[in-house]
Image (tube, rainbow, N blue to C red):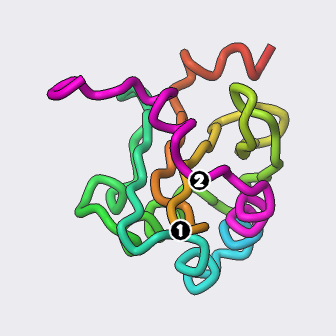
């Protein structure tokens, strides 16, 4: 399979298993707005990907350079004071739900490398969140 890239679901299964405790730590750090706590759960080469579908503005920091600092800044911006974060099963894997009131406004999933969050995906696109808000 040279030259062909595996689909995301296949790549995810080959990486480290996501420990739900690290997502709890991410949730606590986002809720508290603690940059050091966010850095502690993110891999130095972490990449934050936010899918807003162009409907909601993405945090400016998340559009900048990759890496832990950009991810910290983007995650902090996502966790506004009126956001509640709960753990949940997302496509059969541990994830986080971001609520504003009773509505899900974001779903977070991640891959791990060296027991740290390496790739963090956040879906904020309202069209993709419809089934969470039925």
Disc 2 marks which residue?
Answer: 16
Q: Which residue sits furthest bottom?
A: 36
Relative placement, left or right, of 34 versus 92 is left
Numbered circles on residues, count: 2
Q: Residue at x 69, y 73 (%)?
A: 29
Q: Quadrant of the N terminus?
A: top left
Relative placement, left or right, of 54 versus 27 is left
In this rendered view, identify the residue nearer to me: 64 or 113: 113
Say whether marks 1 and 2 touch (CB < 8 Å). yes
Q: Residue at x 33, y 57 (%)?
A: 60
Asked if residue 36 is among those painted magenta in the image, a careful observer would answer no
Q: Position of residue 76 (x, y in %)?
A: 55, 66
Q: What separation in Å lies between label 1 and label 2 (alpha carbons)?
A: 7 Å
Vertical side of 110 occupied by 113: above or below? below
Other-residue count near label 1 (Cα within 10 Å), few / some / many at <14 / 14–19 / ≥20: few
Q: Position of residue 38 (x, y in %)?
A: 58, 74
Q: Residue at x 53, y 34 (%)?
A: 123
The residue range painted magenta reads: 1-27
Chain-order first, disc 1 or disc 2: 2
Q: Quadrant of residue 68?
A: bottom left
Vertical side of 65 occupied by 9: above or below? above
Q: Which residue sits furthest left?
A: 3
Q: Which mark is residue 59?
A: none
Vertical side of 42 occupied by 112: above or below? above
Q: Position of residue 54 (x, y in %)?
A: 35, 28
Q: Quadrant of residue 55?
A: top left
Q: Residue at x 75, y 22 (%)?
A: 132
Asked if residue 17 is among those painted magenta in the image, a careful observer would answer yes
Q: Position of residue 134 (x, y in %)?
A: 80, 13
Q: Which mark is residue 114?
A: 1
In this rendered view, identify the residue nearer to me: 55 or 120: 120
């Amino acid at each position: 399979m040279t030259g062909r890239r595996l689909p995301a679901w296949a790549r995810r299964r080959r990486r480290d298993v996501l420990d739900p405790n690290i997502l709890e730590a991410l949730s606590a750090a986002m809720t508290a707005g603690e940059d050091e706590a966010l850095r502690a759960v993110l891999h130095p080469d972490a990449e934050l990907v936010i899918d807003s579908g162009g409907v909601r503005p993405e945090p400016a920091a998340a559009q900048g350079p990759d890496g832990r600092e950009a991810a910290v800044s983007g995650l902090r911006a996502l966790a506004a004071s009126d956001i509640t974060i709960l753990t949940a099963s997302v496509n059969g894997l541990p994830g986080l739900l971001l609520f504003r009131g009773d509505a899900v406004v974001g779903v977070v999933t991640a891959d791990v490398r060296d027991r740290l969050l390496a790739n963090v995906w956040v879906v904020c696109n309202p069209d993709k969140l419809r089934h969470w808000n039925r």
